[in-house]
Image: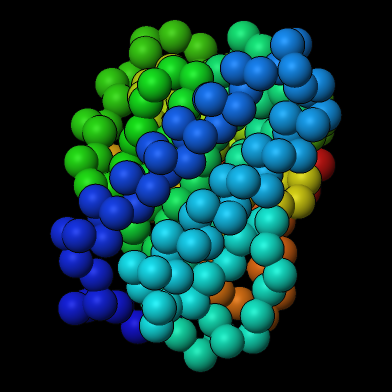
Amino acid sequence: MGSGAGLVSDLDHAQAARLAQEAGRLLMELRGHIGTDMSPEDAKAQGDRRSHEMLARAIAELYPADGFLSEEGADSARRLGCRRVWVVDPLDGTREFGEPGREDWAVHVALCIDGRAVVGAVALPARDMVLSTQAPPAPPAAAGQALRVLVSRTRPPALAGRLAELLGGVTVPMGSAGAKAMAVVLGEADVYVHAGGQYEWDSAAPVAVAASAGLHVSRVDGSDLVYNRPDPWLPDVLVCRAEIAREVLGALARAAEGG
């Protein structure tokens, strides 16, 4: 894949952050109807659809020549001929969105260039927060305690549990992929590893933000994360503090071998 030099601007970073924030506001307004005139199931369905429609419309208007891939939209082979492709998850953590009070859900907006996630924004609407490549957060300091390994609150993978054991750490359950990756960015956890199956929209924006914040991002075998492929299935991801990446990758290799 090429470097993409000259194909990204400061405005792209700003637009990603703005779009994620606006989608988050739409979702928070919709969520406010749960328990009054809307069921959680209706809110989740409408949230997925309306956030997707807003993002798809805005990106098409702003960047008509760019490719587009969304969890909630029909895929098109057109994107494969584009060097610039927007990859979005309009509502990451739909389950958590439908549970009033939970904060671990997100909106992902990423721009991938030549297969690399280089622009990204992750909105955490229930926390009134947007983390983005426009203003990358400072790398988190070591917490000086047992390493905290984030796992799915509903489908904790065995690999993550074994990783925490090998690292002498603890597992911390949390909802959406974006919320987990941003917890590492914010220094609220140390490692996010997922090997149970994902798509490009699950990791593109979180990976862009985490990399811009100085964190390590890769596949669980240490190889690069590549986006805008014909099949958007991208089953695993690792986000962790850079200074522990070698240790984490070594433990992941042992865990995969049954060690």
From the viewer's perspective, is residue 177 above or below residue 109? above
Q: Residue furthest front?
A: 37
Q: Is residue 246 left or right of residue 167?
A: left
Q: Based on the displayed image, in which of its 4 quarters is residue 119 positioned?
A: bottom left
Numbered circles on residues, count: 0
Q: Nearer the viewer, residue 136 or 165?
A: 136
List x then y, in percent, for residue 124: 46, 28
Which part of the image, by quadrant, shows the C terminus? top right
Colour style of the rendered protein structure: rainbow
Q: Position of residue 65 (x, y in %)?
A: 39, 83
Q: Position of residue 222 (x, y in %)?
A: 53, 56
Is residue 203 visible in the rendered image? The answer is: no
Q: Is residue 45 visible?
A: yes
Name the residue located 60 percent from the left edge and 27 percent from the top edge.
30
Residue 117 in which image quadrant:
bottom left
Which residue is at a point 34% across and 61% down the rendered structure image?
A: 118
Quadrant of the snapshot with the N terminus: bottom left
**Front residue (pair 24, 155):** 24
Q: Nearer the viewer, residue 166 or 56?
A: 56
The structure residue drawn at horizontal position 79% and vertical position 31%, both measured from the top left corner, is: 42
The answer to whether residue 223 is left or right of residue 195 is left
> Residue 91 location in percent, x, y?
61, 41
- For image coordinates 66% across by 25% down, the residue present is 97
Front-most of residues 1 and 254:
1
Up/down of 131 relative to 120, above or below:
above
With respect to residue 54, does 150 lie above or below? above
